[in-house]
Amino acid sequence: MNKIIAIDTPLAEISLRKYEKPENLKDRDLVRKLCLSVGLLQPGDSRDIIVDILYVVLKAKEPLTSMDIENNVIEFRKHNNLPLQGIASSNIRRQLLRLRDIFLVEKLKNSYRINENSKLFELFVEKIEKYYLNSIVERVKDYINEADVRFPRQ
């Protein structure tokens, strides 16, 4: 007899973490903590190419192609004596998609930039906090309310 196993795929998810205040951090460390804070990087994860991708996009004054980003990331990692792991073109594009999924980066034609060329704070408040996070919280409330109906307490 075959068992069917349901795979619960979330419609949306986000991990938020609180760290110490960002004081006396070097630029890359600041971007790393930002990635950790919004769930783009897991604590202790050595595969941190997303940090350098976001760093390169943040530093750029103009939109960059994925090839420009790849070249800048390689140069940055070499300059900082970091291992050249995760720099395959396909991985760079995958990480850019993750940055797009949480509304930090947008794609214009074949180039990438910070979404709407906005400040990150504005993007976080408008796109993540008000829209994305709110929709997740509202759905969790739906489940909590339904559980209260089905499992009443005195």
Image (cartoon, rainbow, N blue to C red):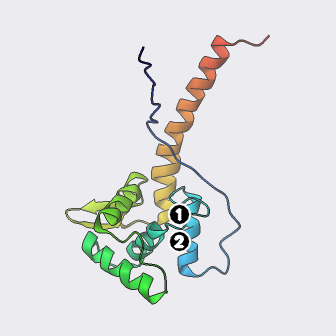
In this view of the protein, can residue 65 be seen by the observer?
no
Toward the right, the furthest residue is 154
Judge from the rendering whether residue 107 lies leftward or rightward of residue 141; answer left or right: left
Q: Which image quadrant is residue 57 in?
A: bottom left
User: Which image quarter holds the N terminus?
Assistant: top left
To which residue does mark 1 refer?
Answer: 35
Q: Which amino acid does label 1 sit on?
A: Cys
Residue, x 71% and y 67% (percent of image)? 20
User: Which image quarter holds the C terminus?
Assistant: top right
Toward the left, the furthest residue is 109
Q: Which amino acid does label 2 sit on?
A: Val
The x, y position of residue 35, in whole percent, is 53, 63
Of residues 150 and 89, the one nearer the viewer is: 89
Of residues 111 and 96, the one nearer the viewer is: 96
Residue, x 67% and y 81% (percent of image)? 24
The x, y position of residue 45, in whole percent, is 56, 63
Judge from the rendering whether residue 65 lies leftward or rightward of residue 35; answer left or right: left
Residue, x 51% and y 46% (percent of image)? 130
Q: Mark 2–mark 1 contact, CB under 8 Å?
A: yes
Would you call the spot at circle 1 few (<14 residues within 10 Å), some (14-19), or many (20 or more)?
many
Of residues 84 and 137, the one nearer the viewer is: 84
| Label placed on residue 31 | 2
Which secondary structure lies at badge 2?
A: helix
